[in-house]
Amino acid sequence: MADAEKLRLGVNIDHVATVRNARGGEYPDPLRAARIAEEAGADGITAHLREDRRHISDADIEGLMEVLSVPLNFEMAATEEMQKIALRHRPHAVCLVPEKREERTTEGGLEVARDENRLAHFIAPLREAGSRVSIFIAADKRQIEAANRIGAEVIELHTGAYCDAHSEGDFATRDEELKRLEEMSFFAHSLGLEVHAGHGLTYDTVSPVAAFPEVRELNIGHFLIGEAIFRGLVPAIEEMRRLMDEARA
């Protein structure tokens, strides 16, 4: 069992860029959001540079690498283009995620078990460059074992099914998904993997996941950016931080 050290909060700023890109121009600035998130207590910043550049841009990544004093978690698809960008910037962490042009947001976890050989070769130069490699996967034993075999140091468990079931009022499914997340957090930790979690987490759903002692980091974005419209980014992050700390205690 992992010890109860502080649970880290990574704030995803993608959807600040979504609002900016809806109209064009430079406002609101994702870099400003990242700096504010740091001041509010974020332990890291997450940004997903998609192939279609629908929110975060190449310039955003360059700017983040220049201004951040906390680690950057660079989410990306496992493509040659993204590998080159990651090797050029050498962020603290690279998180491989599945990506489809037609999706609104990342759907499901990366299929590692069916693509082990390619992914093992893909992540090797990233690790050699000094970036920690994380794999965004479903809470599935087969995928966790595959991620471990290819040399990933971190897995990020997809919490979307749990959060969706909660919002739909399907509490039986919600509890099943939460139990699966708990069991797979423990299993991944037993293999020596660092365990992160994220996708769809809100004030109502974060505490049970934050309470898992094996989980070291939560990455939360869309909800916090949405909540910031009503209460401001700093109070939104501070409330999430409070709930996480209470659950951990």
Image (spheres, rainbow, N blue to C red):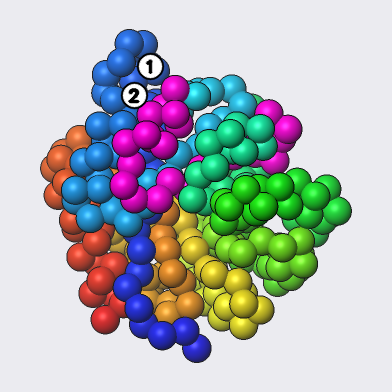
174 relative to 191 in the view: left or right: left
Where does residue 177 sit, x and y in percent of width and height? 54, 68
Residue contact between numbered discs 1 and 2, judged by CB atoms under 8 Å: yes
Mark 1, residue position: 22
Q: Is residue 73 one of those drawn in magenta?
A: yes
Against 28, is 146 above or below? below
Under circle 2, the secondary element is: helix
Q: Which mark is residue 19?
A: 2
Give the position of the C terminus as an image quadrant. Answer: bottom left
Looking at the picture, tell me which residue is in the foreground, 170 or 194.
194
Identified at 49% across, 50% down, the residue is 92
What segment is highlighted magenta in the picture?
59-82
Could you tell me the amino acid type at mark 1? Ala
Where does residue 42 sit, x and y in percent of width and height? 28, 53
Where does residue 69 sit, x and y in percent of width and height? 31, 47
Quadrant for residue 15, please give it.
Answer: top left
Quadrant for residue 5, please give it.
Answer: bottom left
Looking at the picture, tell me which residue is in the foreground, 164 or 18.
18
